[in-house]
Amino acid sequence: MSRAALSMPWIQRHCSNGVAMIASTERQSLSKPHSSVNRRHVLRAGAAAAAALIMPRPLMAADRVKINLVNTSGNTNLVLAALLKQEGIFEQLGLDTNILHVADGSKLIGSLLSGETDMCALSGFGQVLPAIEKGAKLKVLAGGALLGLQAIMTKKAAIKSVKDLEGRTVGTGSLGALLHQLVVALLRKKGVDEKKVTFVNVGSSTDVFRAIAAGTVDAGPCEAWLAGRSGTRIVEEARFYEDLPEYTYQASYASERAIGRKRDAIVRTLAAYAKLYRFLSEARSHEAFLKAFAAATGKNDREEAEAQWQFYQEHKPFAVNLVLAPERVRYMQDLNVSLGVQKSVLPFERVCDMSLAQDAVKLLG
């Protein structure tokens, strides 16, 4: 019987029947002097029977809703995925989840549009907006990491401020992708001409850090908690989470087809991530995060894990209430238009559907 069927009249009727049956059994047993069933045993059995009727049964694997997620393969996403599974958050929301991690946004969008996966839970979404403009049936559903997790780092003594990046090589991902877009937005805000900077596609922010440490590029965006390692330091006024807070780093999105077919599963998934974001903002997540970090990265680097967790505690970058404000989406579209990757700013309702995020928050209570 489903949980929905356990209405109060049903419980009252069946509990009443159960009590009547127990009372009858008790009378019969007490009328027999040599019966091995005494009053205490009968009452104990009755209490257990009543509790079994009222308490919901645990969710079994067969009860869970299946969903296939796709996220990018950076350190942060890998650790958060490990933490979600480790803490059983998906199971708590009735989900049977498979997560695919891919190298870049183009593969991610292709996976969603082909139907191979149902939803992206956490990734940069700047490239989603021009894809929608070109006809891709996608919708942005919620905020993820509202603040950038990186800062521009260097080992070069001569590079002290953002202005000093002119004439230098800066490692990013591909042109127009998340890391490149972040750096360009910061340069413009600080009055630096990005045409005077030589961008080098080296890959993820982890790859950028390695390139800086090896001296193959002069600077680049790296996870802020790595500052100080391998002789690196943060360039002045180049902390994205402080110096470019208007840039929304990551969001959740899905195809319109998946929203139509798997709305309930997507809402539950958004609720799972909201629960994760709230957990990460609390001190009680400390040991669980360290354990998930070791499992996801395959290394027992407690210093790095501590620094990453402390960053989350201090800056609280995640969208604990999920809903993405229209002005954040407008900023991303304006940036795209200025970079020439999007022709015009689209209406908020054309690119976003925040109703699923609102339902997910209600689900958590």
Image: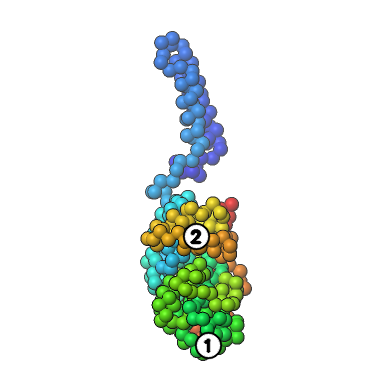
Q: Residue at x 48, y 78 (%)?
A: 155
Identified by mark 2, the residue type is Glu
Which residue position holds label 2?
Answer: 306
Residue 121 rendering spot, x and y as whole percentages: 47, 64
Residue 248 rendering spot, x and y as whole percentages: 55, 71
Q: Is residue 241 above or below residue 295?
A: below
Q: Is residue 354 above or below residue 106?
A: above
Quarter of the figure that contains the N terminus: top left
Residue 19 rendering spot, x and y as whole percentages: 51, 25
- The label on residue 166 is 1
One can see residue 242 in this view: yes
Q: Sort mark 1 into few (<14), some (14-19) or many (20+) by Cα contacts within 10 Å.
A: some
Q: Residue at x 41, y 13 (%)?
A: 35
Label 1 vs 2, first from the N-terminus: 1
Badge 1 element? loop
Name which quarter of the figure residue 83 lies in: bottom left
Q: Please name whichever residue, 8 or 115, is drawn nearer the observer in this view of the structure.
A: 115
Identified by mark 1, the residue type is Glu
Q: Residue at x 49, y 70 (%)?
A: 228
3D distance between C-alphas at marks 1 and 2: 34 Å
Q: Residue at x 49, y 40 (%)?
A: 56
In this view, which residue lies farthest toward the top?
33
Q: Is residue 185 above or below residue 314?
A: below
Q: Please name whichever residue, 223 or 7, is drawn nearer the observer in this view of the structure.
A: 223
Residue 30 rendering spot, x and y as whole percentages: 47, 13
- The label on residue 298 is none
Badge 2 element? helix
